Every structure is written in structure tokens, then in C-alpha cells.
Amino acid sequence: MSEPNWYFAVAGAQHGPVSVEQLQEMLARDQIGADALVWRDGMSNWVAAGTLPVFSSPKASASAQPTYPPSAYPAQPNTFGQPSPRAGVPLDYYTPSYNPPPYAGFWIRFGAAFLDGIITAIAGYIIGYALDAAIYGTMGRGNQATALASALGNIVGIVVTWLYDALLESSEHQATLGKMVVGVKVVDLQGARISFGRASGRHFAKYLSAFICAIGYIMAAFSDRKQALHDHIASTFVVHR
């Protein structure tokens, strides 16, 4: 079970923290409705549970219109100036017009991947050239040196693309340079920033997307939420900024 970091409000009363699994179970059992307001650290506003992908379902989507209490109370601000739930303290409810995140389609993702491919190829070439020079300068030119340079070049290529993806997508930008240029980013199912570990898993899952005749990538063109296979594996979305 995940960390209990979700709060929910029903009829003006705050409850929590609970885990995402507990909230999903309460929704499934009709203990709370899809219009119940939910919040967790990292979200700027309270929103209806049914409007979030992690809680959405055919039943929830039909009734996912946010409802808000008739009165508002001062919130307990956290260090970032956002409302932070606190036991026994009334909440400050917001009434934004919330829409599901605009998912990034296949072609804009293709453009981002194309730019990223150019960037990582240039970086790999520079590092590989320096590595080859060091190997040939030490061992001279021969079959053994060539084999070693080739093997290390492949390793460097794997490491460069991995760190490029994982470090940037788990950073505050939530995007590689290519994604920044086209204006998209990677988020988890709650719309929050992903960790380095999840970004790493997403990167290596791309090998599976590619190995099956790139069908894993093409899935993004036909999925309702524009998820490629590696997005399904890592539980992520690519959305517009």
C-alpha cells in the first residue's frame, strides 16, 4: 500500500491522510462519491476525485462535477503558500474550473523524441570520440583496441541516453530538452513530478516499446490518454504544459 498522503472532504468535513488505495476502495464501495474533494501535497487546488485519472472510472466520470461547501475558512498555508490540510482546522476550499490534463499526442511526442535523438547522438559522439582517442592512444590500433572501443561505445550510449532521460524527466522541469521545446512534460497518474527511479524504469521500458516493431510507441496514437506502452508500465502520462 502506498504512503497515506491524500486528504478528502465530504460535507465540509476534512478527513485523512489516507492512501490512494484506500480512496479508490471508498469510491468503489460508494462510501464517498466522485464529487468528493481530494488533495495531496504537490497539488495547488482541491479537486473532485472523479476528475483525476487515478480515481476515474465510467461510473465516476458520469458524476465528476465538483461540489463545494457553502462556506470557506482560512487554510493553514505551508512553506510554499499552498493550502496544507491539518487535523481539526477548517479548510480553504477553492472553486477553480478544473479540466483533465491535455494529453500530448503521438506526433508532438515524435517531434520531441526526434530532437532528443539528435541531442543524445551528439553527446554520445563527443564522448565516444574522446574515449576512442584514449584507447587508441594507449593500445594502438588493432583488433583488440577496436573491439574494446566498440564495446565501451555501446555502454556509453546506453548510459548517456538513460541519464539524459531520467535526470531531466525527474527534475523540476519534468521534461527532456526535446519535450521542453515542444511544450510537454511527464507526470504520474496524479499529475505530479515523477521520481528518478520511475523515470529510469520508464526509460528502459522504451526498449520493450521498440523491440515489438515500435508498436509500443504507436500505441500513443490510439490510446484515449495518449499513453505509449512504456507509459502504461511506468504509470505516467505525457501532457502539455
Image (cartoon, helix red, strand yellow):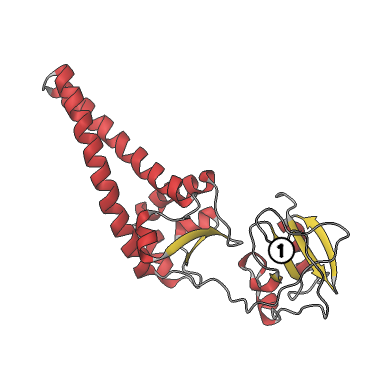
Residue 109 quadrant: bottom left
* Amino acid under disc 1: Trp
Task: Please tell me in which quadrant of the rendered image residue 175 appears.
Answer: bottom left
Q: Is residue 212 visible?
A: no
For residue 32, above or below residue 232: below
Indicate whether 147 appears above or below 110. above
Q: Is residue 223 left or right of residue 114?
A: right
Q: Is residue 174 left or right of residue 161?
A: right
Residue sitting at the far left:
141
Tell which of 164 and 89 is nearer to you: 89
Q: Residues within 10 Å of mark 1 (few under 14, many from 20)?
A: many
**Is residue 237 in view from this perspective?**
yes
Q: Position of residue 96 (x, y in %)?
A: 65, 77
SS type, badge 1? strand
| Picture residue at 38% right of the left edge, 45% below the top | 164
Residue on which the image places disc 1: 39
**Could you say which is closer to the camera, residue 65 or residue 39?**
39
Q: Is residue 51 above or below residue 147?
A: below
Q: Residue at x 34, y 61 (%)?
A: 112
Q: In this orientation, which residue lies closer to the viewer: 124 or 23?
A: 124
User: What residue is at 68 percent from the left and 61 percent from the top?
Assistant: 82
Which residue does the image show at 70% across and 75% down from the upper left?
A: 60
Instruction: Tell me which corner region of the image, top left, top right, bottom left or bottom right, holds residue 46.
Output: bottom right
How many callouts does the rendering have?
A: 1
The location of residue 173, given as percent across then percent down, is 47, 55
Most extreme residue toward the top is: 139
Where residue 148 appears, as percent x and y from the top left, is: 23, 25
Q: Position of residue 136 (x, y in %)?
A: 15, 23
